[in-house]
Amino acid sequence: MTQPTPGTPGPEKPVEDPDASRPGPPADAAPDDRSGSQVLRQIVGGDVAISFLAIVIALALGGVLIAIADEDVMASLGYVFNAPGDFFGAAWTAVSDAYVALFRGAIFDFRAEEFERQIRPITESLTFATPLILAALGIAVGFRAGLFNIGAQGQIIIGAIFAAYVGFAWDLPPVLHLFLAVLGGALGGALWGFIPGILKARTGANEVIVTIMLNWIAVYLVSYILASGPFNPSGTGQRSPQVGPNAEFPRLIPDFLVPGNTFRLHWGFVVAIAATIFVWWLLERSTIGFEIRASGANPHAARTAGMSVGRVTVLTLVIAGALAGLAATSQVLIDRGSLTAGVAASYGFDAITVALLGRSKPLGTLLAGLLFGALQAGGTLMQSITSTPIDIVLVVQSVIVLLIAAPPLVRAIFRLPDPDAPPRRAAATKEAAA
Amino acid sequence: MSAPVIPVTAGTPSDDLPKSAEVLGKVSYRWPITYAVLALLSLLGLAGTLIVRDGAWGQTTTFQSRYGDQWFTIPNFSLPSLMMVLLLTAVLVAATVYAYQRARSRRELPAWLHIVVLLAFVLAFLTWAGAGKTSVIPVTSLLAGALALSVPLIFGAMSGVICERSGIINIAIEGQLLFGAFAAAVVASFFTAPYLGLVAAPIAGAMIGGLLAWFAVKYEVNQIIIGVVLNTLVLGLTSFFFSTVLADDRATWNARQPLGVIEIPVLSQIPILGPVLFRQTILVYLMYITVIVLQFMLFRSRWGLRTRAVGEHPRAADTVGIHVNKRRVWNTILGGAVAGLGGAFFTVGSGLAFGREMSAGNGFIALAAMILGKWNPMGALVAALMFGFSKNLVNVLSSIGSPMPSQLLLMLPYVITIFAVAGLVGRVRAPAAEGIPYTK
Amino acid sequence: MKLELRGITKVFGSLVANDHIDLVVEPGEIHALLGENGAGKSTLMNVLYGFYDPDGGQILLDDQVVDFDGPGDAVRAGIGMVHQHFMLVPVFTVVESVALGYEPTGRGGILDLEEARRKVVEISERFGFDVDPDAYIENLPVGVQQRVEIIKALSRDAKVLILDEPTAVLTPQETDTLIGIMGELKAAGTSIVFITHKLREVRAIADRITVIRRGKVVGQASPDSTETELASMMVGRSVSLAVDKGPAQPGENGLVVSDLTVLHGGTMCVDRLSFEVKCGEILAIAGVQGNGQTELAEVILGLEEATAGSIKLDGKELRGMSVRDRLRVGIGFVPEDRSTDGVVSSFSIAENLILDIYDTEPFAKGLSMSPAKVAENAVKRTEEFDVRLTDIQDPLSTLSGGNAQKVVLAREMSRPLRLLVASQPTRGLDVGSIEFVHNRIVAERDRQTPVLIVSTELDEVLALADRVAVMYRGRIVGIIDAAEAGPGGISRDVLGLMMAGVPHEDAVAQAATHQSRLAEADAAADGKDLS
């Protein structure tokens, strides 16, 4: 029986074929498989191990690319047979420099002197992770409903437009201003999610194409808006006015904890955590989540059970868009934050890989977001120190996702057992019941 | 008024046939509404804004058809703008009325009507844009540019047709285009031979197609996901190498290597259309061949019959001895190669060096063209040409000083695509088994 | 050509579908393979046809061992198969469908469809099939599609023809025609292997019968055996073929359908249909698949809106109400296609048990659901309906067909119903589950619920129904009351003729003068029926 790709949407293949000669296992099948060997197989061949190994392979491949792109390595390749040590030495240096920089940028800078600078990297990772987690949660919800929301990028941009406007154009007391700006961001994203939702529900328009088209439209729209009126005080069309101080997310690490810190980490991260919990509740404990999961797994059965698949589609994409809009707020509603053309960076696409790695589950998405946020943070430092372009992070992320989408491939590479396959012994014949 | 069709089995007693139905299905006003919108836009947006200008009745638009060597060059001609626009608006209104009548009587609209409406609207728009301006509307060069810009879209759509008709959803067209562009640029630059780049492009596309096929067929991973991830992977790889190896030594790795324009004698001198169709790079000629061959092979050859069977009802194909998965894999690789070839347009086909993210969403517009074309090569061609035309319109309009801000014009192809997949398509039927991995 | 299967074994995971099966089919013989749903018949034929590789055993043709690499080899060796679910591409024409796989080509791989068309016409004329070579498969009625399948097999010069449950989609009259065709094929020297779970047919048609149960050959039988003998061999215990039900006590009208019309494109699927189902009675809609029954059921539930007419439940008009509202008003719906429309295979058994009531108390308060209540409900229902399972949190896909259908029934019957609609309630189920389902349906009727059954299985209709309405081409040809039908119950032959469109009185008249071959076989065996 085919396993659906973990965490991805798609209607199920009908399992019950009326003329299939395979009734399921009778209830009296003795469950003597739950032995120690089964547990071991689960650990070694199961999801977590696969994810870990996928990361290892991806980093290894990344290392190969880094080596190829390094000038010294290429130079020493020319005479590798005369002095192989040079080649391997150069390769090792290139790769290890890059990855050490990655670690120093992502987790812990052991070369820094003060404590504050030492733990700065991890705060950077969390800061990068915040928009990733939020956008990825939106995409994950879409996946569970069987919808491919490739439009997070556009949703972030539109959310940013709304949030920035509320931030700089209005003048309100502290908590209220931030709250409304965040709300504006969510509404903007929700709007950009509503469009593909309603189009799919009413006309059957393919949401992959519509969301991608909306991404491009959003890109041109933001560039147009930046060149006009209130968004363009300086006349350059590059940057909007900065958001007011009452509309900024406050810093998360207060001064008394780490004196004199200039960490960028802000309360948006808490919003991300809260969103994770919300999405968990939504999918697992709410009626809307039940409908979402049913429509994603089997829209026919959902309709026959009285659910309105069209309504679910619209609702799902609106929620997804809103979450992406929240991701935008963490880009815009910060100290000296403003709207620029590059406000969404590549978060919209990175978030897809995060959702896939997290298998569309809230907790998994959170963890995957943290991981990829760390890669971003580390990659930034890596780029500045070793001039390894940050695109390598994109490659590593894609390879990870490809591998975890195909667990048998990873198992094959490492020769691991499959915990779901029956253990190799002669199949016992079932006895006639009468 | 067509009577409802009632399927009859052999042996139906004749007096048991139902009398002609008193109850009929719902009428679809989709096309009349679309035409009405266009007519209204033309009336208010075009004619309306023109009329209010000073000296509106005296303004003219100049059209130019000069573009290279033709048998006889139609000299630039000027038309009175407002009159033209009003005339064309009248055509649109007439078409709307006609479409409404046909819709009410539940008859299909003839294809020529769509073309007439499209031409009328576009002509009206161009006339409006050029009204009273000194610069000319270069009709021929507009068409030629549109065709050129459609090249990656057409190749992409053909790739989509091949893959999806076999049952594999190919979202990775974007990545195949990009990788093809990259390979073409790098190989052409390294060997200083643009035609070698042209050979490398389909190989690069085939590699991505192979990856797609491998994950989709062997590991049965969701095909849309793989497509999206492959696009990201290609983006990352090409950007990585662009910023490192290519940037370090542009002369070796990323020099411009344009494919020369090849003029086909005699044919290229037909007025207006000649230069458009027959004064292009070899890539465009390859495109003609690809479309014609694919249209023929898909419906008249054994390969086509088996491919279509595999995409509609793979089990049925399997029971007559056709190797479903093998066929899907090879067709996907072929599709990847076709898309890769289309990617060569961005670099050697345009005489440009490789840049980040060059494919700019073309792969997805190509998919829209495929859907609009109902998975037929000819239909996809027409749809892709329409998109390509809208992309070129932006260039032309900005060169003559268009009244609309450039960013809004740049959105145009994407907005049109959305309208196309949402509105005009109606409910289309994709190959029945597409996206579903086949296991016994 | 003599066909022999020796010790064929086929295993799927831990399930042994075929266990050392031996079968011999002599040339020019009609050999029936009899077994209930899930016994392993189709798997065996798929092995013979080269679709599956056997895990053990051999296939011999004319005493030579053959090894098929795929269906292509089997076809070339002279084996043709007519599948139960047709292997026809809906968007192809008849000629293209027949040509697929062996396509005659000209130069360069270009198709030569004239050759294929010639074959279609030739075979069609030889057997009186009357098939239009240029028709699109999806526009053909089911009976004609089956003929295309047969043409496909014959066009490859099949010497052994395998027919998998061929009569599932035919009226008794069309079955008669098919039996005639099989006779002609046999006279021409073709061997036929005929797979079925219907006892009446094997007696009328087969030269020899092999009975399979749970993957093993249980024994040989002769066409003279009684139905009861055959049934016991098939199921392994004595089976009562009738449902234990008391007489109906119908009350007022529950469901009233008037002038219901459903239009699909230009086709009238349901044509001014009118009938009522009273509380406490079972009305069965009989008819061959494809005469509008599916659309009727969908329109009653609300999955599709009717074009005209009215549906009233307890006096309230249902048209215009959403599916959800109709379910809340008290409709219980058992869909025809369980796996596509009835259950979400990846959801747990517990979740499936509340699939259409998940947002009602006690399972949810407002938006928030309570897993504890869901689990509690699941434990209660699965016990009540005797669902064999390991854990209520397991995915539904772990259940067998019979148990999955019990889950659907448990769900629908777990709330007070004003109407039960069950479409093909026992399709694909083993005999034990069939009995269970039938008893439950009768129990619901005895609670004074109106019950509407839609079934293509005549046996089921005759066993369950208090009244039978026969549908043909979207109309009701006639409604027969079982109580008024006389001592023998409703006549199969009459029903069969009505299913082909003949009005009731004419059907009665015709049945009196002309017996179908099945009825002949019945009569012949009647003297020996020991039940």
Image (cartoon, grey):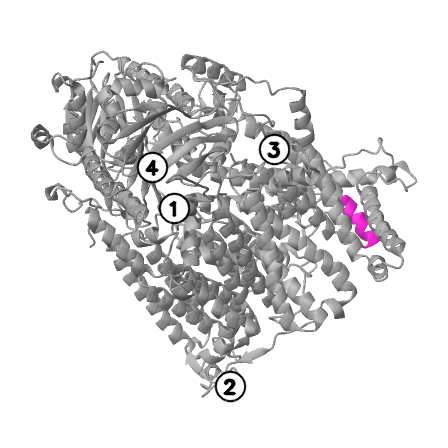
Per the model, the C-alpha gap separating discs 1 and 2 is 65 Å
Q: Main secondary structure of the magenta part?
A: helix
Question: Mark 1: few, some, or many residues within 10 Å (few <14, many ≥20)?
Answer: some
Indicate the position of residue B201 as horizontal and vertical percent values. 61, 64
Residue identifier under label 3:
A361
Per the model, the C-alpha gap separating discs 4 and 1 is 21 Å
Helix, strand or loop at label 3? It is loop
Magenta residues, as a range?
A: A376-387
Disc 1 marks which amino acid?
Ala
Disc 4 marks which amino acid?
Gln
Question: Mark 2: few, some, or many residues within 10 Å (few <14, many ≥20)?
Answer: some
Residue identifier under label 1:
C77
From the viewer's perspective, is C485 left or right of B326?
A: left
Q: Are marks 1 and 2 in contact (CB under 8 Å)?
A: no
Residue identifier under label 2:
B69
From the viewer's perspective, is A321 left or right of B13?
A: right
Q: Are marks 4 and 3 in contact (CB under 8 Å)?
A: no
Per the model, the C-alpha gap separating discs 4 and 3 is 41 Å
Residue C494: image quadrant is: top left
Q: Are marks 4 and 2 in contact (CB under 8 Å)?
A: no
Give me the disc on residue C84: 4
Disc 2 marks which amino acid?
Asp
Helix, strand or loop at label 1? It is helix
Per the model, the C-alpha gap separating discs 1 and 3 is 52 Å
Residue mark closest to the camera, 4 vs 3: 4
Residue mark closest to the camera, 1 vs 3: 1
Question: Mark 3: few, some, or many residues within 10 Å (few <14, many ≥20)?
Answer: many
Per the model, the C-alpha gap separating discs 4 and 2 is 66 Å
Pointer 3 indicates a residue of which chain?
Answer: A
Give yes or no for residue A381 being in the magenta stretch. yes
